[in-house]
Amino acid sequence: MNEKELKTETPARDEAWQALQLVREAEERARQMVEEARTRTAPDLLRRAAEEAEEARKRILAEARKQAEQLKKEIVDRARAEAGTISQQAEAEKAMILKAAENNFEQAVTRAVARLLELVETRKVD
């Protein structure tokens, strides 16, 4: 090789070598960025996922409480309505029993009076 070829070849080699060095440095920076993203992003993603899960749990729990309160209110309202109906039925039965007792009492008094009168009359005659 002559000196001229060597000189023209050397700058081309130097440029190629520098370009190769730049590519290697860029690759290393890219690897570092990927690793940094992994180390930073994974815990951050886990933290965010945990926060979102906690928020979802709270939302679901609040909705379940709300539904339970609504169901409880409906059950209590139904029980009160049924208790009112039963109370009305009991009062009606009580009124019927009292009326029947009153009728029976009047009949019993009438019979007792008739029997007493009968006894009194039969003793007067004797």
Image (tube, grey):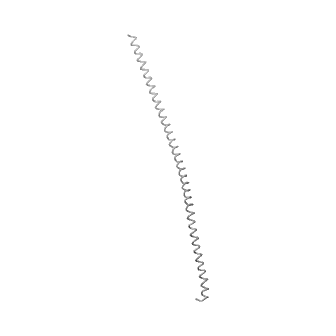
Q: Residue 113 appears in which quarter of the rendering?
A: top left
Given residues 57 and 105, the one toward you in this image is 57
Q: Nearer the viewer, residue 53 or 104?
A: 53
x and y percentages locating residue 78 in the rendered image: 50, 41
Q: Quadrant of the N terminus?
A: bottom right
Q: Quadrant of residue 115?
A: top left
- From what the image shows, is residue 54 above or below residue 33? above
Q: Where does the image place residue 70, in percent across and percent down from the top left?
A: 53, 46
Residue 45 higher or lower than 97, as above or below: below
Q: Up-down: is 51 above or below 88?
A: below
| Residue at the limit of the structure toward the top, as seen here | 126
Identify the image quadrant of the C terminus: top left
Give the number of callouts.
0
In the foreground, 113 or 47: 47
Residue that protrudes farthest toward the bottom in the picture:
2
Q: Nearer the viewer, residue 124 or 93?
A: 93
Percent of width and height locating residue 51: 56, 56
Q: Position of residue 86 (x, y in %)?
A: 48, 36
